[in-house]
Image: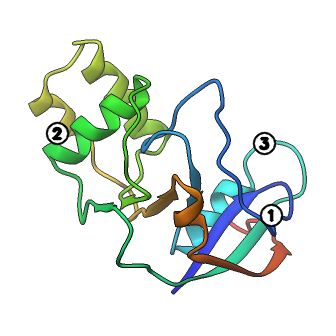
Amino acid sequence: MVLYHAGKEIVEYPEIRKTRFTKDFSWGFYCTNKYEQAVRWANRGEGSPVINIYQYEPDNTLQKLTFPEMNDDWLDFIAKCRQGSIHNYDIVEGPMADDTIWNYVNDFLYGNITREQFWGLAKFKYPTHQISFHTLAGLNCLTFERSETIYDRNK
């Protein structure tokens, strides 16, 4: 399976970096199988948009958590990760909480909206996908193929 990592630099050797803010599935190296999504993300902010392309070879001996769709388990997992909780999965895969969805997750976390209100608001304009790698064993499933600089023609 081909995966894409959006950014501003070539990433031949992916890393897991602990940053100030956690992401949907905690700290990890994030990719997507949706090229258009990667192009949108690479074109955010300043700098040249770079798409890194990897071949992903699953390893069934690893601990993997998959969310086929947004549901209560997905929401609870993201909420915990965004609050700084860590987990023991090598790889986590599922829908992405984009900026708009994240605002709703944040409102849910702080009790500003109920779970039911969250689901009423959380409708994507387009399908999203993310797969995150949280251990070196998980990263070993990726093989760098190439990178390309590509500008979003829809901007």
Numbered disc 1: secondary structure: loop
Residue bearing mark 1 = 11
Q: Position of residue 7 (x, y in %)?
A: 75, 55
User: How crowded is the residue under tag 3: few (<14 C-alpha within 10 Å), some, or many (20+)?
Assistant: few
Q: Indicate which disc, 1 or 2, sits on the residue closer to the N terminus.
A: 1
Residue bearing mark 2 = 120
Q: Indicate which disc, 3 or 2, sits on the residue closer to the N terminus.
A: 3
Q: Is residue 155 visible?
A: no
Look at label 3 and name its amino acid: Gly
Residue bearing mark 3 = 45
Look at label 1 and name its amino acid: Val
Q: Position of residue 64 (x, y in %)?
A: 34, 63
* Label 3 to label 2: alpha-carbon separation: 30 Å
**Residue at x 25%, y 23% (from the top left corner):** 108
**Residue at x 29%, y 12% (from the top left corner):** 110
**Residue at x 38%, y 28% (from the top left corner):** 85
Q: Position of residue 120 (x, y in %)?
A: 16, 39
* Label 3 to label 1: alpha-carbon separation: 18 Å
Position of residue 111 relative to residue 71, above or below, is above
Q: Select label 3 or label 1 by which is in front.
A: 1
